[in-house]
Amino acid sequence: MVRRTGTGVVTDDVIQYLKGQHETILERLKAVLRMPSVSTDPVYGEGMAATREHFLQRLQDMGLDDVRLLDGGGHPALYGAWTGAPGAPTFIIYGHYDVQPPDPLELWHTPPFEPTIRDGRLYARGASDVKGSTTIAIEAVAAFLAVTKRCPVNVKFFLEGEEEIGSPSLRKIVEQHRDLLAADAMISADGGRSSTDVPTVSVGNRGIASLEMKVRTAGKDVHSGRYGGAIRNALHELAALMVTLHDAEGRITVPAFMAEVPRLTAQQRQDTAALPFDQVAFYADIGGSSYGDSVYTVRERLTLQPTIEINGMWGGYTGPGSKTVIPCEAQAKITMRLVPSQDPNKAALAVRRHLEAQCQPGVTLAFSEISGGSPAFSLAPDHPLLAAAMAVVERTTGRRPIATRAGGTLPITSIFKEMLGLDTLAFGFAMPDEDVHAPNEFFRISSLHDGLIAWPLLLAQLARYKPGDFHRSA
């Protein structure tokens, strides 16, 4: 029976059911972690297909309607709905089934696609980002349907297959299926917690823009003995260009890029400082050292300030031994993390024009096609999504959570806001130290337990609102 409590149509029976299903759910999670769903590499096509089939079957088995693939020309998204709560709000529940490549394989302590539990941690590629939290969201809805035969709110699952490659097909999918994706707001299983010991709720994330470039200095590679000292070296020139993006302390030196970055408000700085942060441990954990504008704290640099980062540089000879060559061509990839008020296209153009202006005579610089960027996203302080999440986290932890911004990017938040008018609550259960995108990624078993309590409470809490409560002007 459904028990009405202080949070609305939440049920102790559903939570008890999920506790009893914990081992079964863990085994389901392990099964999907064994599937190598790497979206960026065609070699993993079978793994992507197997993962789609796994989730499609699960959505069908739990009793959702209209379960299908939404194809935008790349890796399809998965859709399934339950809309049997007339008068209640409707939420897109978002997750993604693709993962990052496992490389470098030699640094994994156990095989990346063979989930292994050690010290209360489930190690596997995709465990934290984001198959663990996606599984929590699915199982919470499944439990309501199994125990009470209904869900407190209407839900539409949208499981993307291209999040890890910048969501190139997402806009086309949304354009083709606007009516299908109509909802009042979105809850994302992606976007985790900001601390391992302090309760937090995410209120936004940085945006992203990217560039790929090629420098040429001659028509062909030449012998370094015959030509060295007399012609330009493409790698030297590329390195010189990259150096112009920052000063010695790490401050960005591209005026047009920084022109749209507003000064931090006292409230922003106060909110950021509210989260305890051990700077010494932060750097020690990665064996790194401080870099960036010292006017801002490390936490402010990580969440409230933009970045320009070189993700890769290559050219010339990189094989074993020596080859005395002067390369005529060198390439680089750059990404920029953006703050609210920065437009991705303008930001990328500002960096591009800066680099073009720095080119020396005889050096040509060409830019390749890149995937579209995403602006930063923010959830209003008085938004009902935030109020519901704060209430649930406080109830489950016994402590008032801190509102935090994420330094990473979740493209769907800005795209769904722009195209569908939906705000997003990021309610994932990953922790910041779980080595996402790196060898030995893991997800805490305790997070699975915590999420399977919090998600049913959140859905019930959101049922207190009317559909119109979630619609805000852009």
Image (cartoon, grey):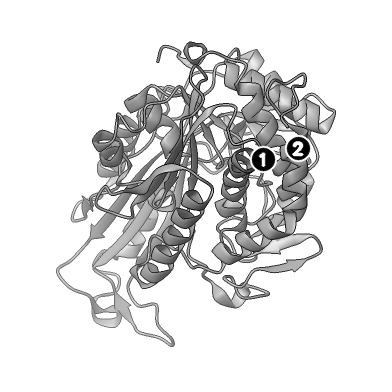
Q: Which mark is residue 263?
A: none
Using the rendered view, name the quadrant where residue 436 is placed. Answer: bottom right
Three-letter amino acid code at the position of disc 1: Val
Mark 2 Cα-neighbour bin, 10 Å: few <14, some 14–19, many ≥20: some
- Please tell me which residue is depicted at 63% across the width and 38% down the height of the picture: 144
**Residue sitting nearer the eye, 313 or 11:** 11
Residue 157's place in the image compared with 269, above or below, is below
- Between the C-alphas of marks 1 and 2, the distance is 7 Å
Q: Is residue 39 left or right of residue 153?
A: left
Residue at mark 2: 13
- Please tell me which residue is depicted at 31% across the width and 60% down the height of the picture: 331
Residue 32's place in the image compared with 296, above or below, is below
Q: In the structure shown, which secondary structural element does the residue marked by tag 2 occupy?
A: helix
Residue at mark 1: 147
Mark 1 Cα-neighbour bin, 10 Å: few <14, some 14–19, many ≥20: some
Residue 175 locus on image (x, y percent): 25, 34
Q: Is residue 339 left or right of residue 169?
A: right
Using the rendered view, name the quadrant where residue 303 is placed. Answer: top right
